Image (tube, rainbow, N blue to C red):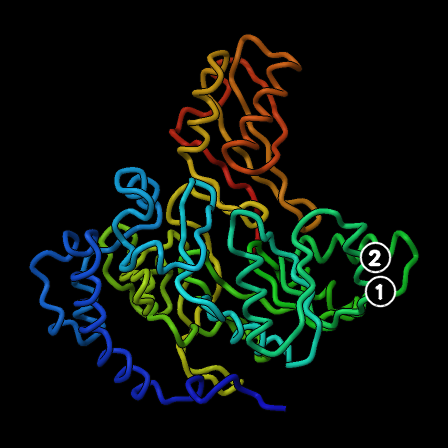
Amino acid sequence: MTEHFDSLETRTPATRDQAVFTQLPSYIEHAIKHTSHYREHFKGVDPEAIRSRDALASLPLTRKADLIGLQQAQPPLGGLAAAQLSAMVRLFQSPGPIYEPQGEVGDHWRMARALFAAGVRAGELVHVGFSYHLTPGGWMADAAARALGCAVFPAGTGNTELQLAAMQQLQPTAYCGTPSLLKILIDKAIALKQKRLSVRHALVSGEACPAGLKAWFAEHGVAVFECYATAELGLIAYETIAREGLVVDEGVLLELVDPHTGQPVPPGETGEVAVTLFNPVYPLIRFATGDLSASLPGVSPCGRTNMRIKGWLGRADQTVKVRGMFVYPQQVAQVVARHQEITRARLVVLRHQHLDELSIHCETIYPSDELAQRVTNSVRDVCKLRADVVFSQPGALPDDGRLIDDQRHLH
């Protein structure tokens, strides 16, 4: 069995850097010429001078958190698209809302590399448990599986009994989706005294999958590998058989930067993940994700030579990811604005038995079941998630300016 997806994974670091920084100047010039955002953002920049990591670090960041405002001011894509909508394949909507384009058919998000590293090979049936609705998760996994020569069962989210029945009949050997859905399916099969699922390897994302949960999956016959991906960037990094951090994808240039200055942090220190994506339709240069990570020294024992990161180490802002969906502080403010009875609110995220739990704590002097239902509906409409509602008297919540309190302890 081939150990690597292609020869790019085993290039020497010097060869990789030469290829990337030979390409970078023309890519920056393309972005300046074809997008209004980078024409303004990089005003006065000489693309030919950007031929090293130090030179790249001189450019300003574009923050994921700013996309909401940019797209509202200049719809639909905030002046970042370098092609007309007629050249796009699909547009997706993530919470915020933030809109993301699919610029080409095939493995646009480059996820096949991560599926391959998880052990998936041509001819397998892949059970895709990401949503195909609004957000691109299902499409990302679907395109990757097809690129590897696999058939796909597009399960999506929900309808777990129907999903389990399909798994028992179709016998998929691979799964791609959130770890929580896979756990629910395994737990349900056990509760119904059904035979062990046929899935033998899985690529999971969208949620944390700590070592304890991976060990639980292994006990149930599933080797689970993580990947780090976003709707805008596609694959960023992925886990390999070495189980030592995540290897950076060959299609991106990753920096770890100080969230305040945008300057690279020393090797091994925690910094914000900033990615340059070589996508001519939707160029993203020094795109700051808001996620924190740190680099690992040396190369992976699996033979892949690209930079490795430790995985997700938290957020540089209050934004959180819950059940695979980003939630932003301004969304909590939008929920509060819908209900004059509420003076303040805070979204609280917990994790119980490897599953995310969400509640919204609201200060009000008018608590009622009817208000709780309206708030529940608002959270679902704004954040696309369900949350329990907890009422308290005015002044009960900490006066620290936080709208989201992530109390999960994942590492």
**Residue placed most toward the observer, 353 or 69:** 69
Which residue, as the protein is rendered here, is positioned at the far left? 44
Tell me if mark 1 has few (under 14), some (14-19) or many (20+) residues whose alpha carbon lies within 10 angstroms of its own: few
Looking at the picture, how far across and down is residue 15, in whole percent? 31, 88
- One can see residue 229 in this view: yes
Which residue, as the protein is rendered here, is positioned at the far top? 366
**Going 53% across and 62% down the picture, which residue do you hit?**
140
For the C terminus, the quadrant is bottom right
Tell me if mark 2 has few (under 14), some (14-19) or many (20+) residues whose alpha carbon lies within 10 angstroms of its own: few
Which residue, as the protein is rendered here, is positioned at the far front? 86
SS label for mark 2: helix
For the N terminus, the quadrant is bottom right
Can you tell which mark lies on residue 169? 1
**Going 49% across and 87% down the picture, which residue do you hit?**
303
Judging by the rendered image, the residue that carries numbered circle 2 is 165
| Side of 2 relative to 26 (left or right) | right
Q: Quadrant of residue 367?
A: top right
Looking at the picture, how far across and down is residue 289, in whole percent? 37, 54
